[in-house]
């Protein structure tokens, strides 16, 4: 395609209007809001632009407009906290513990994401909250990332589809979402000061995509600028991100609230697009008033900030005081959603010899591993919830065991919650006594369910894992168990990927079980006993070795740090007593830049393009049945920019039980003139098919979804040519392909 045609398309895109979009509902009260602003003093306005308490910001008391109340987090309405995040120990602040982000993503189900968001929204209101600090939707760039479990996926298309529905669900229930952390907060190492260097195309096509979708398609009302810098500027004062892209290109009408402790300046942040400083008022308090009085920050800028806040305040009705926090927020419907998400998220990675589902001949099961009894609702620093109950894997297996005898041995111990993550978690070492007991239990059983993995002290906000190895002798333990009983099904309880090279040798069946919410144990047991066929698909790649993954292979992570004070983490420094609450400690560190020179080649995009083997591929997940993909047909052979490509095929369940399959469609440009990943996910569908039945499946790709970001025109451009539509059960299991022209 010629450059002139490129330009025409780019112009067409930039001329898009935002009238009638999900954002435009926020402007419905602008007249009323402007009248209110006209009556406000500068002091009243600025009062709204910083924290009132650790989890609220001020309204307009003189005009009867209530404060805005925030609550973590992405997977359950967090319990009430006071200054310094002290727990308030209320008796009415429990809420449903939903499966964490990567588990939700493993369902590949926008429908479930909507129900999940809706449940969060309903419970948010029961807790008297206006804004949920979530969903957390950054791309999982590093296998070691401390917040991988909160985040959704390494793929922007999957993350976007889920973020949109979570957003709609919550906001339909009357609670605004605050999508976080905007943007490129893909590592916890030095997150408070690291400067991420990424080119515009990489940002637009990969890292910003889920945010763009949540704002433009989901109508997200609040956005949280991240701790880190992007291309030289802190996110909370990043004019390009907040003003040019978020407000300009995406038409965002709501407000931004800095991550807690992530505001760094008065004028920079005020002009750079931040609405609310969280927490404190050292920048957006008196200093901001002075800047306005000195004529440095125009009053119109302050008015815009207040207007954007009031738009959300008007769109979200404040919960009456006599409704909030009357009893536990947890609702039966949310718990049902949590169970459904959990059952659809469990990923069967491997099932040699059909070890699973558990056979009727198995009369005695030894459940082995600390993670079979570990509680996971809390921990990991910010994200956590006071669950009314939590069914552990062991309890779930006991609940569903019927006549089967279940024994338990701990095998190893893991540090659990730990205040600020790993810094304070004393790491215990391998425990030989526990090992011996576990081996004995295994030798006396027909089958072993080995529950291993990490904990929320190992995967946590504020630090990244140093490796992805299964910790604390878990590999040695399974080797010893397999010598006495090789009939093992392993369940990995973790939020991110683990190195499975050793485990793989000893375990004929492996299941990824996630941190799966308060019904997680029941859901897991229903899969293990074969009541439900597993149908989760990996939302990220399991590399063979950590070093194979792109940021490591390119030498971009870990960055060699000369940091000396704290861990370079603003948030944890702010509340750590040993640093005397010195929130600037992190800023004095010399932290090397995080170069994203692998560009678009993150996750499977890297492994596919570089033809590197992986342990388990993005999109992988087995079932107890086989699915046959019939011949795929496209509805046309050639498409224009405004068309929607429709590919139809028959999907047959060849097994003897009902099962779900997630059919995936990847696009490969066969003769592209520009650099692209080998293939990219562009459509998927979860389908339920009865035993022996056939379903007709149609996957749709709007041609506009195929545009790439052209830096020379600073816009989205469609490249014409021949594309292969690759349809399959995983990114490495393509069953059908159709070639069409654009
Ligand atoms: C986290 C946010 C969280 C906030 C408030 C920060 O440390 O990065 O995700 O919403 O704390 O708890």
Image: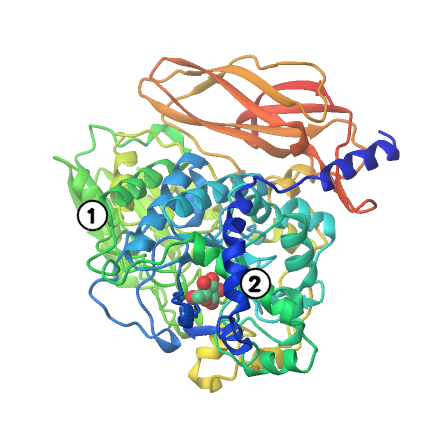
Up-down relation of residue 457 to residue 529 (above or below) = below
Q: Which residue reaches farthest bottom?
A: 580
Q: Which residue is mark 1?
A: 395
Q: Position of residue 231 (x, y in %)?
A: 71, 62
Task: Check the image and tell me how it is coloured.
Answer: rainbow
Circle 1/circle 2 CB separation < 8 Å: no
Instruction: Sort mark 2 into few (<14), some (14-19) or many (20+) by Cα contacts within 10 Å.
Output: many
Q: Earlier in the sequence, mark 1 or mark 2?
A: 2
Q: Which residue reaches farthest left?
A: 403
| Whether residue 109 can be seen here | no
Is disc 2's CB within 8 Å of ligand 1?
Answer: yes
Up-down relation of residue 516 to residue 467 (above or below) = above
Say whether residue 501 is left or right of residue 192: left
Is residue 367 or residue 72 the one in the foreground?
72
Q: Quadrant of the C terminus?
A: top right
Residue depicted at 50% across the width and 52% down the height: 29
| Whether residue 606 can be seen here | yes
Q: Secondary structure at mark 1?
A: helix
Q: Position of residue 173 (x, y in %)?
A: 36, 46
Is residue 525 or residue 509 the one in the foreground?
525
Quadrant of the rendered image containing residue 618: top right
Q: State the CA–CA distance, disc 1 to disc 2.
A: 38 Å
Q: Nearer the viewer, mark 1 or mark 2?
A: 2
Residue depicted at 39% across the width and 37% down the height: 112
Instruction: Sort mark 1 into few (<14), some (14-19) or many (20+) by Cα contacts within 10 Å.
Output: some
User: What is the number of the mark on residue 226?
Assistant: 2
Is residue 346 or residue 500 the one in the foreground?
346
Q: Position of residue 257 (x, y in %)?
A: 52, 64
Say whether residue 677 is left or right of residue 144: right
């Amino acid at each position: 395609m010629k450059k002139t045609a490129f330009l025409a398309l780019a112009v067409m895109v930039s001329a898009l209007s935002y009238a009638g979009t999900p954002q435009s509902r926020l402007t419905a009260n602008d007249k009323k809001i402007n009248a209110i602003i006209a009556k406000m003093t500068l002091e009243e306005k600025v009062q709204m632009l910083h924290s009132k308490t650790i989890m609220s910001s001020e309204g307009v008391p003189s005009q009867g407009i209530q404060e805005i109340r925030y609550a973590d987090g992405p997977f359950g309405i967090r319990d009430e906290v006071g200054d310094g995040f002290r727990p308030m120990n209320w008796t009415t602040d429990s809420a449903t513990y939903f499966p964490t982000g990567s588990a939700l993503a493993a369902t590949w189900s926008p429908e479930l994401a909507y129900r999940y968001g809706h449940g969060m929204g309903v419970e948010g209101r029961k807790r008297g909250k206006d804004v949920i600090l979530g969903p957390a939707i950054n791309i999982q760039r590093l296998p070691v990332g401390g917040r991988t479990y909160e985040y959704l996926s390494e793929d922007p298309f999957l993350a976007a589809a889920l973020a949109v529905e979570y957003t709609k669900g919550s906001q339909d229930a009357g609670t605004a979402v605050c999508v976080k952390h905007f943007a490129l907060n893909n590592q916890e190492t030095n997150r408070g000061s690291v400067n991420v260097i990424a080119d515009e195309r990489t940002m637009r096509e990969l890292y910003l995509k889920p945010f763009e979708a949540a704002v433009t398609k989901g109508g997200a009302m609040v956005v949280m600028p991240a701790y880190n810098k992007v291309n030289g500027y802190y996110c909370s004062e990043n004019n390009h991100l907040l003003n040019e892209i978020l407000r300009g290109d995406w038409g965002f009408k709501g407000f931004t609230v800095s991550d807690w402790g992530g505001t760094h300046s008065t004028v920079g942040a005020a002009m750079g697009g931040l609405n609310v400083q969280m927490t404190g008022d050292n920048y957006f308090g008196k200093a901001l008033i002075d800047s306005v009085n000195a004529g440095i920050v125009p009053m119109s800028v302050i008015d815009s900030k207040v207007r954007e806040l009031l738009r959300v305040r008007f769109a979200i009705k404040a919960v009456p005081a006599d409704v909030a926090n009357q009893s536990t927020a947890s609702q039966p419907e949310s718990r049902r959603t949590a169970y459904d998400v959990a059952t659809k998220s469990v990923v069967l990675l491997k099932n040699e010899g059909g070890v699973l589902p558990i056979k009727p001949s198995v009369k005695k099961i030894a459940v082995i591993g600390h993670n079979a009894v570990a509680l996971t609702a809390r921990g990991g620093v910010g994200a956590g919830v006071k669950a009314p109950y939590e069914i552990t894997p062991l309890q779930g297996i006991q609940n569903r065991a019927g006549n089967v005898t279940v024994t338990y041995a701990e095998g190893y111990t893991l540090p659990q919650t730990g205040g600020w993550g790993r810094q304070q978690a004393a790491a215990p070492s391998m425990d030989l006594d526990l090992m011996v007991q576990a081996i004995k239990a295994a030798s006396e059983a027909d089958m072993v369910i080995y529950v291993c993995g990490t904990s929320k002290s190992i995967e946590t906000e504020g630090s990244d894992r140093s490796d992805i190895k299964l910790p604390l002798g878990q590999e040695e333990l399974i080797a010893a168990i397999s010598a006495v009983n090789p009939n093992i099904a392993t369940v990995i309880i973790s939020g991110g990927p683990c190195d499975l090279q050793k485990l793989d040798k000893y375990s004929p069946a492996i299941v990824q079980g996630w941190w799966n919410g308060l019904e997680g144990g029941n859901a897991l047991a229903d899969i293990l006993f074969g009541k439900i066929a597993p149908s989760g698909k990996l939302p990220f790649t399991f590399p063979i070795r950590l070093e194979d993954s792109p940021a490591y292979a390119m030498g971009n992570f870990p960055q060699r740090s000369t940091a000396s004070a704290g861990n370079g983490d603003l948030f944890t420094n702010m509340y750590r007593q040993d640093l005397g609450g010195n929130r600037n400690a992190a800023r004095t560190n010399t932290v090397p830049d995080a170069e994203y020179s692998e560009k678009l080649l993150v996750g499977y995009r890297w492994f596919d393009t570089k033809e590197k083997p992986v342990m388990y591929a993005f999109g992988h997940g087995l079932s107890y049945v086989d699915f046959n993909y019939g011949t795929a047909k496209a509805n046309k052979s050639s498409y224009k920019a405004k068309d929607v490509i429709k590919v139809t095929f028959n999907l047959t369940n060849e097994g003897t039980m009902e099962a779900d399959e997630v059919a995936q469609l990847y696009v490969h440009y066969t003769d592209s003139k520009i650099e692209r990943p080998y293939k990219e996910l562009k459509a998927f569908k979860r389908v339920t098919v009865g035993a022996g039945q056939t379903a007709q499946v149609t996957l749709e790709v709007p041609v506009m979804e195929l545009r790439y970001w052209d830096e020379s025109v600073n816009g989205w451009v469609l490249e014409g040519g021949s594309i292969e539509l690759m349809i399959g059960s995983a990114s490495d299991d393509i069953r059908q392909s159709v070639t069409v022209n654009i």
